[in-house]
């Protein structure tokens, strides 16, 4: 069955907007895990607007206690600065099961594109090797339809994460066919190259079932923005369980 990793960044955004410790990111993560989530995802950004470095060790401990995965996202090329020692240094501290590398810039509102995978990829391969040496599974964020997706295996990564934003946007208009076909083709090509397939960005209860029905062999979905928004009305426990029911139905 496809696994659900809940991204708790939006809890941290709300906390950081006021200062202090509420809402509690760790308590939210524990609630998701108690409801049956298969993992927790975070994206600590250099500007510290999301989950911050100090959040990582408690979250790593919580996922370890539940025996599930901790997934840290980030740009491996973002330089260290005060309050942000760099993605590799953060992962050295907590050794997540998975690290998902994304090519976002410091000022980017959200991750909205994958690696181009063109030209000389030696620098990216070096970054992948550094995370793999920590024992992390390495996933690269890629656009559906990327013509070079097989190069993810070439640089030594283990999985891709398909950027599903365009699919979600198309699904909302009732015209998801072409976007879904691109995702499915990308998944098949990645799997043929020996790669696992994850997916994430703007997946929701409204579109997740159709996505999993149309895209073969998705191992993990990372869902945050929609799930946290839905939980404002239904609660975290009920919302996580609703997603798990969708995954079970798609099995």
Image (tube, rainbow, N blue to C red):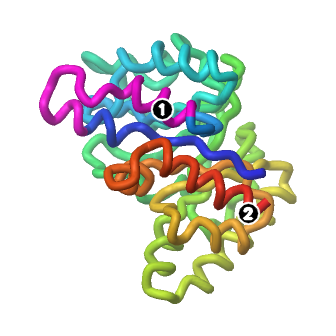
How crowded pointer 2 is (Cα within 10 Å; few <14, some 14-19, many 20+) is rated as: few
Residue 176: give its label. Answer: none
* Residue 247 picture location, percent across and down: 69, 57
Q: Which mark is residue 31?
A: 1
Question: Can you see residue 161?
Answer: no
Q: Which residue position holds label 2?
A: 249
Camera-side residue: 11 or 145? 11
Looking at marks 2 and 1 on the same chain, the residue that comes earlier in the sequence is marked by 1
Q: Quadrant of residue 36?
A: top right
* Majority SS type along the magenta span: helix
Looking at the picture, how far across and down is residue 77, in whole percent?
A: 45, 33
Residue 222 drawn above or below residue 177:
above
Residue 25 lies, in percent from the top left, at 36, 28
Figure check: 94 above or below 19: above
Q: Which residue is at the front of the view, 133 or 161?
A: 161
Residue 78 vs residue 54, the one in the foreground: 54
Residue depicted at x 32% and y 26%: 24
Which residue shows up at 69% across the image and 46% down it? 3
Task: For residue 217, say whether it is visible.
Answer: yes
Residue 87 among those drawn in magenta: no
User: Eyeballing the image, is 219 above or below 66?
Assistant: below
Q: How busy is the neighbourhood of tag 1: few (under 14 within 10 Å), some, or many (20 plus)?
A: some
| Residue 143 location, quadrant | bottom right
Point 48% across, 32% down: residue: 31
Residue 114 versus residue 53: which sits nearer the camera?
53
Vertical arrangement, residue 115 with respect to residue 135, above or below: below
Q: CA distance from mark 2 to mark 1?
A: 23 Å
User: Judging from the image, what secondary structure is the residue with disc 2 in?
Assistant: helix
Residue span colored magenta: 14-34
Describe the element under mark 1 as helix, strand or loop.
helix
Q: What residue lies at 46% left-to-right and 46% top-to-bottom? A: 103
Q: Going by the image, does 240 lie left or right of 84?
A: right
């Amino acid at each position: 069955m496809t696994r659900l990793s809940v991204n708790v960044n939006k809890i941290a955004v709300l906390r950081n907007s006021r200062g202090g410790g509420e809402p509690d990111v760790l308590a939210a993560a524990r609630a998701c895990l108690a409801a049956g989530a298969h993992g927790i995802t975070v994206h600590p950004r250099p500007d510290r607007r999301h989950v911050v470095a100090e959040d990582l060790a408690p979250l790593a401990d919580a996922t370890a206690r539940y025996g599930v995965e901790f997934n840290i996202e980030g740009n491996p090329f973002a330089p260290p600065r005060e309050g942000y020692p760099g993605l590799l240094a953060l992962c050295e501290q907590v050794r997540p099961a998975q690290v998902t590398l994304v090519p976002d810039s410091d000022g980017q509102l959200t991750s909205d594109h994958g690696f181009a995978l063109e030209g000389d990829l030696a620098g990216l391969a070096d970054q992948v090797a550094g995370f793999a040496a920590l024992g992390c599974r390495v996933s690269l964020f890629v656009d559906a339809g990327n013509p070079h997706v097989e190069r993810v295996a070439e640089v030594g990564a283990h999985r891709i994460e398909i950027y599903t934003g365009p699919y979600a946007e198309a699904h909302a208009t009732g015209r998801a066919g072409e976007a879904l076909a691109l995702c499915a083709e990308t998944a098949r090509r990645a799997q043929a190259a020996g790669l696992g397939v994850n997916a994430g960005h703007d997946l929701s209860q409204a579109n997740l079932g159709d996505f999993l029905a149309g895209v073969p062999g998705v191992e993990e979905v990372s869902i945050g923005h929609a799930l946290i928004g839905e939980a404002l009305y239904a609660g975290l426990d009920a919302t996580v369980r609703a997603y798990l029911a969708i995954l079970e139905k798609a099995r």
